[in-house]
Amino acid sequence: MTRRHHALWLGALLGGMVLALCSAPAWSEDTVLKTEAFGTLRRPVAIFDHDTHNEKAGLDDCAICHHVYQDGKLVKDSSSEDQACSDCHALKRQGRQPGLREAYHGACVGCHKSKGKGPVACGQCHQR
Amino acid sequence: MERIYVFVSGPLAWIAWTVFVVGSIYRIWHLLKLAKEKEQVLFSYISFKYAIRSIINWAIPWNTNNMRLHPIFVGVAFLFHIGFFLILAFLSAHVILLEEGFGLGWPALPDIVADMLAFAVLGACIFFAARRVVRPEVAFVTDWTDYALLGLVAAPFLTGILAYHQWGDPLVVTLLHILSAELLIASIPFTRLSHMLFAPFTRGYIGSEFGMVRHVKDW
């Protein structure tokens, strides 16, 4: 290959990379957790592909994550998938109700720890 | 690997802190017992006022004559100790763990500041190691255990930096970070890192003798 060829290939490669970076967001909306309620984020958004996760984890019952609590008690046979976590969980802890970040960490890492499966270290979900 | 992480970040952390607390109490109790048995006179020369005066003066960088003889070393040593404890208590990831684990909470350092401090602490460890090679009077009293202790102190900061920047596998790196920190915490009472426990006693005694008996400053 001539030097000219090298330059052409390199140009095409760089152009392709720029195009790929500009056209596709790193994560589409369904593969990360909702974070609007937090405002400015200190860490990269936690990766969470809802359907893949539930298939892998064998989860059929929505209420395991989308729970409903009333007066500090879990309401059985009731689920809350029509609501955002932040509808109930404020940013700060309120009495026994964990704040939003703590609720996320508790639901995700808490379950992963008890099952011994899934991401448990900070950088596994909050990928740069 | 997840199960190892759960063990290391849970029960092993409790074990490490227990070894640290019980070991520290034992070492201090043993020191006082030894003093009582062999050098009871020490107790009659201890003065709270002069002890505190000496400790405060030696806690200010470049405040003592001796420190001014080694200005660079003193600067690095202060940066190292301040950075060590600031990161330990005010790194945002640490604060979050405390908040979610124990319901304690306080403001955290901005990440960029904590990151720079971590690099500074690591750099200080390299500086201390280099000093042990380069300065003949220090090299003379250095053996392999000094480098091992420096490695022990540097390890949680190196792995912490790797974990924060996500260089390497996050689970492995974070696991190594927690493990190395636990090893460090548990070894404080039983190695020369015990200066953390004993420095106030030695400084306080010297301060007392200089202040109360000789009526001079010890800085």
Image (cartoon, coloured by chain):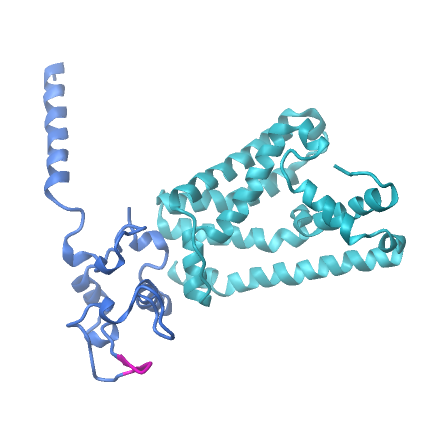
Q: Is residue B3 above or below residue B216?
A: below
Chain corresponding to cyan in the figure: B
> With B126 as the anchor, is B7 left or right in this view?
left
Is B152 included in the stretch rendered in magenta? Answer: no
Question: Which residue appears farthest toward the bottom when viewing the image?
Answer: A76
Give the quarter of the image for residue B132. top right
Residue in front for this viewpoint, A36 or B157 = A36
The x and y percentages for residue A84 are: 20, 68
Residue in front for this viewpoint, A38 or B20 = A38
The x and y percentages for residue A71 are: 31, 83
> With A114 as the anchor, is B137 left or right in this view?
right
Q: Is residue A35 above or below residue B170?
A: below
Q: Which residues are magenta?
A: A69-74
Q: Residue at x 70, y 47 (%)?
A: B199
> With B40 as the anchor, is B98 left or right in this view?
left
The x and y percentages for residue B127 are: 56, 31
